[in-house]
Amino acid sequence: MKKLNKFVYVGKKRGKNIITKKDLLNKKQILITGGLGFLGHHLIKRLITTNYFPIIIDNLSNSSLISLSRISRKKYFFVRSDIRDLKKIKQVLSSFKPIMIIHLAALHFIPYCDKNPKEVFEVNSKGTENLLKIAKEFKINNFLFASTAAVYAMSNRKHIEDSTLKPIDIYGRSKKLAEEKIISYSEKNPVFKFVILRLFNIYGHNDNTPHFIPEIIKKIKNNTKISVGNLETIRDYIYIDDVVDAISQIIKKDDDFNNQIYNLGTSTGTSGIEIVKLIAHFFKKNIIIKQDKNLLRKVDRVKLIADIKKISGKYNWFPNYKIEKGLKKLCKK
């Protein structure tokens, strides 16, 4: 029996929180970083219901095991670790045989990224490099990477995957560099195959980061006067369930991993003021809006919208949630 941390064991010893060979029998093992984050914990729940065994790496900086509290600890394996800790990840994987890496872990909240650029590059770029080293050492040849629409140059047109890459912030630059590391590694290792997903603005229940939509919901729910930043910008908001559906379809066809990049959005733009009006409508509130200069970004895009023809054509995937449907469901939570 091997002790990996103070909570979880791998081996034959009886007791609580033990993973045995029987628990892994006929399960497809997947290493997933950031598995307890906003997207991660929703995806984990889906994976568990579809015969996968998630091996979760998460540093709990903005997440908690509570999100999986209703799921048996024999259905997944969790280790608290930072993706910069290569030694610890290697220790974890010495007891497993994952067939795929789903790399979601990142620092992504823009205000934090702007204040901590060095840490952002260390986590988002160096962390990705560590995962590529893991892939090489443990012969894991399928790699799904959660990138971002922030890698694109400013444009009022919908972005296709071949659109110009010219990020305007630290977060986008760190993700662009991570993409380049993945592509470079694949060119040197022909058996290694990747899928890069450029995620647009995800929203949904249990988002612990103070993103625009959860913050507006909180403000309108509790007040009739709200302070906001720029409400004129237009974004492509995609509901969390649609993102999980898309990723699930992709990993089912892991033999289709062929060094592809896909946009993941809805192809529809919605302005900030439209979001505010819809949320106010669902809460049946008349609100007074005040712009707060402290909530304005120094540099901001006018539009950021996805063209999703590529992923829709490949996987016959289309979003089920228009913004009205998604916000209505979210406001009922």
Image (cartoon, rainbow, N blue to C red):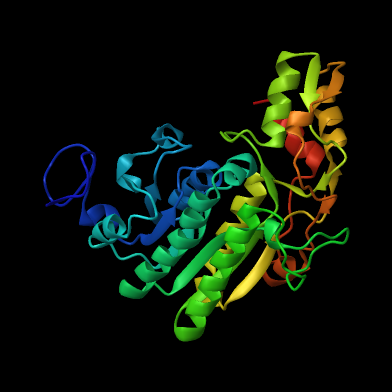
Depth check: 145 or 55 in front? 145
Residue at the spot 29% in from the left edge and 57% down from the top edge: 24
Q: Position of residue 188 (x, y in %)?
A: 46, 85
Q: Position of residue 66 (x, y in %)?
A: 42, 31
Q: How many marks?
A: 0
Q: Is residue 83 visible?
A: yes
Q: Is residue 268 visible?
A: no
Q: Position of residue 69 (x, y in %)?
A: 40, 33
Q: Is residue 72 left or right of residue 143?
A: left
Q: Is residue 87 left or right of residue 136?
A: left
Instruction: Tell me if residue 79 comes above or below residue 161 in the rendering.
Output: above
Residue at the spot 74% in from the left edge and 30% down from the top edge: 294
Depth check: 230 or 31 in front? 230
Residue at the spot 72% in from the left edge and 34% down from the top edge: 213
Q: Quadrant of the C terminus?
A: top right
Q: Is residue 247 left or right of residue 100?
A: right
Residue at the spot 73% in from the left edge and 55% down from the top edge: 265
Name the image quarter holding residue 172: bottom right
Q: Position of residue 329 (x, y in %)?
A: 71, 32
Name the image quarter holding residue 295: top right
Q: Is residue 70 left or right of residue 262?
A: left
